[in-house]
Every structure is written in C-alpha cells, then in structure tokens.
Image (cartoon, rainbow, N blue to C red):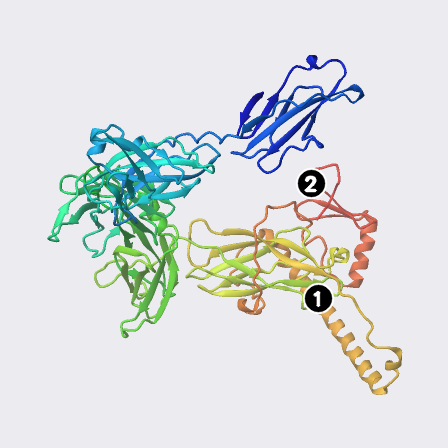
Amino acid sequence: SVQTLTEFGVTLEWQALSEFGNDLQQFQVFRMSSTSPYDYSSPYEVVLDQNTLTDSAVDIGSTYGYVVRSVHSYGVVSNLSQPLEVTIPNPPAPSAVTNVQILDLDIETASAPMKVTWDLSSDSSVDEYSVFVKEATYWDTDVPDFFGNGTITSDKKYEIAFDESGTPNKRHYSPVATVSSGTNEIEVSQTSAYVDMTAGSFPSEYIQDTSQYYAVVLAIDSYNNASSPTLAGPTMSYNNTYINSQLELTVSSGPDAVSENVLESNSGLLLSVYAYHFDNAQQQVAIEDAQLEMTLTYGTDTLVLNGQTDSNGQWVAVDVDDLHDPAIPQNLLDFSADPDGELDIDVSMQSIEIVDTQPYTSASASSSIGTAMMAELAGPASSIDMDANHAVDLNITLTAVDSINPAHQASLEGTTIQWEAFNDTSLDAEMSGSETIAGGKIRIVSTFQNISRIEFSVDTGTRLLIGTTTFSVSLNAYVIPTDTDETDEQIVEWVPDSIQSVTIGCESATILTNQQSPDDPIECILENPNPFAVNVVVSVTESPSLFKSPGAAEIAANGSLTISFTPKYEDPLWIRQDDVNTEKEFAIQVRTSSRDYDIPGQPLLDNSVVSWTADLFVETETTPDTEEKSSSNTLLFGGIGVGVLVLALIGFVLYRRASADFEDASFYEEQDIVVEDEPVELPEGKPLDDFEDKTISKEPEIIERPSDSLISEVDDVEEEAIEEASEEDDGISTDEYGTEWYEDEVGTWWYREAGAEDWSEYNE
C-alpha cells in the first residue's frame, strides 16, 4: 500500500516481517514506468529487515508501478505481489500574494498613469507573477468581488465564471504583464484583453482619467500552479499632473550705507519666503500651507529652520534688529566676524500630494551673503611734535564697533595698516611702509625728517570693513626750546616715556680651539629700536668665561653697532677644550639706558646666550721629502716665510701684553660696570646682512664659574711665575666674589663658596 505520496516521492508498505517466518532473508522490489517495464531479473531495490520502501527518484506527473516478493533460505522465493500504481502529484499552489495595490501616478513624471504593487511571496517555488487589470463596470457593482473569484487556466489565462441572465458564462483575461519572482511592482497603461464566451473577444484599452480600475496578482510556480487571486481597487485615475511650484527668497541685511546684503553684527537680518504658482493666465497664485525648510550654512556649522506658508503664501523665517538677538545662535554671531565668511541660505518646499487634489511639485531657492564688520581707525587727536632727532612715537588703533562680542576685535589682529609720509612741497609720498595690528594697534617709532603729514589706511584685502578706515596725522617740526615764546608760554620739549631693549644678533661661528686664530672673535650686531641714542653695556656673565666682555658703547637713534666676543686664549681653560664639532653657548647680559632722558625702568637688563661651535684643527702632510729637495728657491722662500712668521708672533705677544692691562682694568669688571662719559670705541665689523641668522634664546641662570679676573693674560715667563706661586700656596685662587678655586692633578676644577668648609666639583 501507499504510506505517503508527495511531489518529492512515494513510500510503500507491506505486511509485517513476522508474517514471513524466521527464514526470511530479503525483499525484492521491482518498478516499472511509462518508459521502462518490469525487469524481474534485476530488482529495482533490495530491502533488508524492514517492510517499507521510499522512492524519491520520481518525476512530478509521472506514473510508476511496483511489485514485491520475499526471498527465504535455501533459495525459496515467494510469488510476486499484485502491482501497485501511483502517480506523482503536482506540488501545492503558492500562497496568495499579499498587499496588492493599484496606484494612480503622475503621467508627467512617470511612464504610465497607474502602478500595481505587491509583497514578494515567501514561497520558494514561485516562478513568476501575472498581473491582470480591469476597468470597474456594473458587474463589479452587482456581483460582489466579481474580479477576485477567478482561477488560472492551463494557458495561464485568468478565468472568471458567472451567470449572465441565468446563462452560465466565462471570461478569460490575459495578463497585462508577467514578471519574474524577484519583481514586486509594474507600471500599467492598459487593461487586460479578454474573451467572453458569449460576446466574443475584447482588446485591451488605455487607462482613462476619472475611471476606476481593479487589479489582480497571481503567483505561479513552474508547474503552472497558481495562487488564489488577490484583488486590489478600485482606484481612480484622475488629473494628477503636478502644478509647478515657485519659491521667492527675500534677504535683507547689513548697514544702509552698503548696497549689497552683508552679515554684520550690529545690523538687522530678514529672511522670508514666498511660495506661489502661475495659473493658466500666468498670474501668481499663493500656495497655502506649504511645508518649508531653510538651512543656513556658515563655516562648519548649520542652522535648520522649519515652517509653513500662511494664506498669502508667506513665511518669515528670521526677522531681528541685530545679530545680538537671542534668536541668533552665538556661533552665527561669532561667524559674522570672519573676514572671509560667507553665509549660504537654502530653502526647500516639499511636494504637496492630497487625495483627489492636483498635487504641487517640490521647489527650492538659495542665496548667499558675505560678512562685513564696522571698524574705526584712530590715532592722536592733535598734531604730533617731533623731537630733536626728527623722531616720533605714536600709536594708531583699529577698533571693532561691536564691542560686545570679542570675536570681532580678535578678528582684526594681523590686519595690515599701510602708511605714507608727505612733506609740504610734494603730492607724492616721500616715505611709505606697513605695519600689522597687534593688540589692537600699531606703534610707529621712527624718524621723519622733512615730513609734515603721515596718512594711514587699512589694507582690507578681500574682507569688507565699514566705517573709518583712513586716518591722517600732522607732524610739527622740532623747535629749539627757549625760555618763553612771544606769548610768554613755556615750550615743552618732547620726552620719551618708555625705552626698548637693544637687540643682538650674532654670526654662526666655528672656533678651532687648538689653533687659536686671531680671526676667532664672534661678531654680533646691536640694533637700537629707539628714536633716541642709548648707552649699552654688553657683559659675559658666565664664570669662568672663555670670552672677553665687549664693554660699553653708545648707539645712535635707530642705529646699529658691531661688537665682538674675543676668546681669552691665555686662560688655562682653553687647554682643556678638545670637543669636535660641538655646539656650545655662554651667557651674556645686555644693559640698555638712555643717555639724554630719565626714563622710568631703565636700565633695561636682557639676559641671553651666544652660541658657537667648538672644533679641532687637524694638520695633514702635503709636501713629500722629494719635493722639499726639488728646488733651492723653495727653501729660500720658505726661510723668508719662517722669518716673517717669527716676527709676527713676537708682535702678537707684545700686543697681548699691552692689551692685558687694558682688559684687567676694564673688561674684567663687567659686573660693576657703569656708563662712562666717553664710551669705549668698539671694533667695527660686518653689517648684519652679512651674518647668518642666529637666534639668541634666554636660558635660566646657572651657577657662576670663575670670573675673568681669575687668570690674567700673561706671557710665558709670567705663567711660570704663577705656577711657582701656585705650588707654594697649594694652587688655591680666590675670585672677586670670594669663591676659592682649585685645579687638581688630573685637570678637574673644584670650588668652595666663601664661608663654606667643603669643596664641590665644577661641571660645565
């Protein structure tokens, strides 16, 4: 008998095993089909220890026959059973399609007036979908669910059976579209053609406005099994051509004096939108209740505003008197100070789609405005008197009118101020230059000989500055002071109220410490930024010092001077210098004071360092013995050269002796130095432009080393005398600060402060 029968196979069952006795060995099953008969010499299957057989090697729709016999011991075989025929059935039809809809479309934006949609079936056996569309008629009114009660035919037509005036009738509808199993929508522009068994054939028709339509979707598998129909509708096709919407964006911002709209913090800002469309007479018609969204983009920030139009089609998004209004975000207020800022304004309208109402298209509009700032360039309220050096010291300020928001004043930092200087006889500028705003101002400290007027202007670049951007100041020539003038009024001489420290810039020097060349001094340039002469004292503050202090000098107003730091090669410390290509530095102090004016805060003390590179000179042989003997003239000239060199060395020793007394009396007392009436003439050197850039950085003060007075410059005989004296007093020396110094046998220096009992090792 048949135990189970599906599209996947059949299961057969026969008597229980107990009915076949204990000598049962197996069952033999023979199968026949429409293409092959029974073959009793070759069983289809041999079954052991069970009385069932499952055959899955089948085809749907095919018929198979089965006979069974048992085999026992000693070759005993039973008779064949009665044949059993089975036909493999088709699989069940797919489940009904869900969520079927027929929708009306805008023929101007879509390729068809209507669209049918549905949800994809979860049945894996679905091979395709067939879509049928019918215009609603009296049959659909008189017969409930008329179009939803059909079945599929063998040729995949949709069959509707009904009675017409008591007579049975049928209609076969053709699909308007057949799509694959992965498609769930189709646009349609025609109805299904059909054949009425009584009235004949009817072709498909185009979908018409104001008519109603039904749709049916069937899921069909590969065996032509169709799901039960799912009906959608009726849906009316109406005039759904979109009305072309228009948006008009109005922007009003900035001071009245500016013709263009700009974002300025002290000025009002109005942003409004008007939504409308044109009727057939090309007249504007307001669109009411349009949903609008406005996006303001500034820098990396955005502000989104939403609203809808009133009965006049108007929506006011922003309306403030200035940007300090609470409705304006702080970051937008700050952004108005951006010198290159641009505010982008974008507004969009959603499409309006209401059932049985002609829809409106979406629309958009945009605009942009730059930033602007109100500022004031100002300076002295009256003319300026020049001093005896034709110099002036004046400040010019650039101030943001918006004093509430700090971002505006901060944005003016770095603005360039151009200036031109004129005399009374020419329309062309005699001098010109530029300065950069720092701390809200520029400072002009310079000489303007034969100049009567300086005009200042703001170099705005690409930014828009509104307000006072030019300024002019008159200069009064210096008048030699007298006790009284003709009106008995006392003439007051210009006196500076501040002083700036002299700046120093040094060359990048490399000293060969074992060669000790007279070209080794480190040359530096002193620059006086003051419009009056100053006295300056440059001291080497490290102890012991390897270099001599340049001393005191005078620098003219806005002038410069070259000084030198000369190595003290007579100092024993130079003998211990064996560094190779090593950068070193020594501390200095620059003291600046005025020669002619009593200015509070002077003298100014500026502690800096001077860097230099220590290296060693390595001699190499360049003349072989054979070359030395090659020419008697060479020996003659060589002898002359040696003589000249000896004379030069003798002169150098005499010079060093003479200079030693001067250094002992002058340069070795830099810690207590005072400004002399007659400043020491410093050696002239190269101009600053010939030096490489060298940055002098300030460093914390370190422990003082022995002063320059520890070891004086002496010749070879004096050095021997010092060594004998050192042996007698154990080699202990005392500097002007009371610090005792001692060098042990391995060359290590030790020091002991005044009043201290223990010695400390000195490290550079």
Residue 29's place in the image compared with 193, above or below, is: above
Question: What type is the residue that disc 2 sits on?
Answer: Ala
**Mark 2 and 1 residues: CB-CB less than 8 Å, in contact?**
no
Nearest to the observer: residue 485 or residue 434: 434
Left or right of 54 on screen, residue 323: left
Q: Tell me residue 243's x, y (percent).
A: 20, 47
Identify the image quadrant of residue 614. bottom right
Asked which quadrant contains residue 385, the reply is bottom left
| Image location of residue 641, percent across then percent down | 78, 80
Q: Which residue is mark 2?
A: 754
Which residue is rendered at x = 71% and y = 52% of the image? 710
The N terminus is located in which quarter? top right
Residue linked to disc 1: 656
Helix, strand or loop for disc 1: helix
Q: Nearer the viewer, residue 421 or 270?
A: 270
| Residue 161 in view | yes
Q: Position of residue 118 (x, y in %)?
A: 36, 36
Report the amino acid beneath label 1: Arg
Left or right side of 177 for 289: left
Asked if residue 8 is positioned above or below residue 654 in the image, the reply reads above
Q: Residue at x 73, y 72 (%)?
A: 651
Q: Secondary structure at mark 2?
A: loop
Q: Left or right: where does residue 54 sit relative to residue 620? A: left
Residue at coordinates 88% horizontally, 83% vertically from top-left?
629
Residue at position x 65%, y 60% from top?
663
Q: Position of residue 445 (x, y in %)?
A: 39, 60
Q: Earlier in the sequence, mark 2 or mark 1?
A: 1
